[in-house]
Image: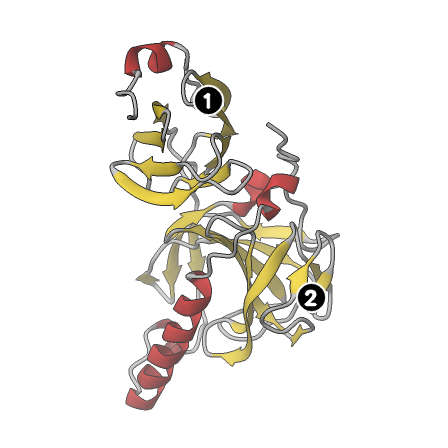
Amino acid sequence: MARGLNRRAVLAALPLSALSAKAFAAAPGLTLSGKYVQGGYVVGRTTPRAMIDVDGKVLTTASANGWFFVGFDRDAPPTSVLTVTTPEGSALHQATIAPGDFDIQRINGLPPEQVSPTDPVLLQRLLAEGARKQAGFASLADLEGFRDGFILPVTGARRSARFGGQRILNGEPKRPHFGVDLATPVGTPVRSPAPGLVAFAETGLHFEGGLVLIDHGQGLITAYLHLSKILAPTGTYLKQGQVFAQTGKEGRATGPHLCWRMKWRDRNLDPSLLVGAGPFRG
């Protein structure tokens, strides 16, 4: 029978920092390393196939080697509680999440249908595209690609927009920008920043143009928008650094660039926070 939560021992062993932290919990054995900030993440290791509860909801299961990933949304609340449950017992980790530093981005001169579509035919097209993209984001490959850490997907690029900025398009407030924009000439090779499986690859999308989604394991998905050419179809396994596409200015874009995004279980993360963070060995 599983033991009850050893909360006093666990919490006493886990002094928290607002940003990077590495902490150790007692039973059932838990190692955490990450960046505790809105848009950030934690990589953990525990008992293989342990259940990972985040804020009262089971969101993932540790891999066969005990690795797991948890992301903190761009609008994450000030605290987040992780509970790891195994046949031996449970461990609880309460994290303090620092607020993000987000810009306000104003973009003018976009075609009206790229800002607030009204054409019924286009709206039907967007619904169909959305369903296909959602299927890609729902990919759950049993991988640990995130353990290697991440490299930038393009070299020599200028960061033209940071993650999380509030966007005002043609004077109309819109959802925050959930990507990192890397300005680079059309045709620049795009490399997989970490090992993973291509979960979606399609050109000609209304907003994204060419779009590729890569599943790095544990539900961690990276997205690459505005591509001019895709070189790896859905189902392709990519090694870190392997070229799979070329940059462009397709879809809703005012110039050539790569929009690089990251999601975990519908939470929007800042992919730049993982660059240079690995490898995770535990």
User: Could you tell me how many numbered marks the image carries?
Assistant: 2
Q: Quadrant of the N terminus?
A: top left
Q: Are marks 2 and 1 in contact (CB under 8 Å)?
A: no
**Could you classify mark 2 by the number of other residues whose Cα lies within 10 Å: few (under 14), some (14-19), or many (20 or more)?**
many
**Residue at x 64%, y 75% (from the top left corner):** 228
CA distance separating discs 2 and 1: 38 Å
Instruction: Name above or below for residue 281 compared with residue 227.
Output: above
Q: Looking at this rendering, what residue extends furthest in the front direction?
A: 1
**Residue at x 49%, y 36% (from the top left corner):** 48
Instruction: Name above or below for residue 196 compared with residue 87.
Output: below
Residue named by callout 1: 29
Q: Quadrant of residue 78?
A: top left
Task: Tell me which amino acid carries mark 1.
Answer: Gly
Q: Looking at this rendering, what residue extends furthest in the bottom direction?
A: 121
**Residue at x 43%, y 57% (from the top left corner):** 106
- Nearer to us: label 2 or label 1: 1
* Residue 76 horizontal/vertical position (percent): 33, 39
* Residue 146 horizontal/vertical position (percent): 58, 44
Residue 244 numbered mark, or none: 2
**Residue at x 51%, y 75% (from the top left corner):** 251
- Please name whichever residue, 16 or 67, is drawn nearer the observer in this view of the structure: 67
Q: Quadrant of the C terminus?
A: top right
Q: Is residue 194 visible?
A: yes
Position of residue 209 in the picture relative to residue 89 (left or right): right
**Could you classify mark 1 by the number of other residues whose Cα lies within 10 Å: few (under 14), some (14-19), or many (20 or more)?**
some
Q: Is residue 74 visible?
A: no
Identify the secondary structure beneath mark 2. Answer: strand
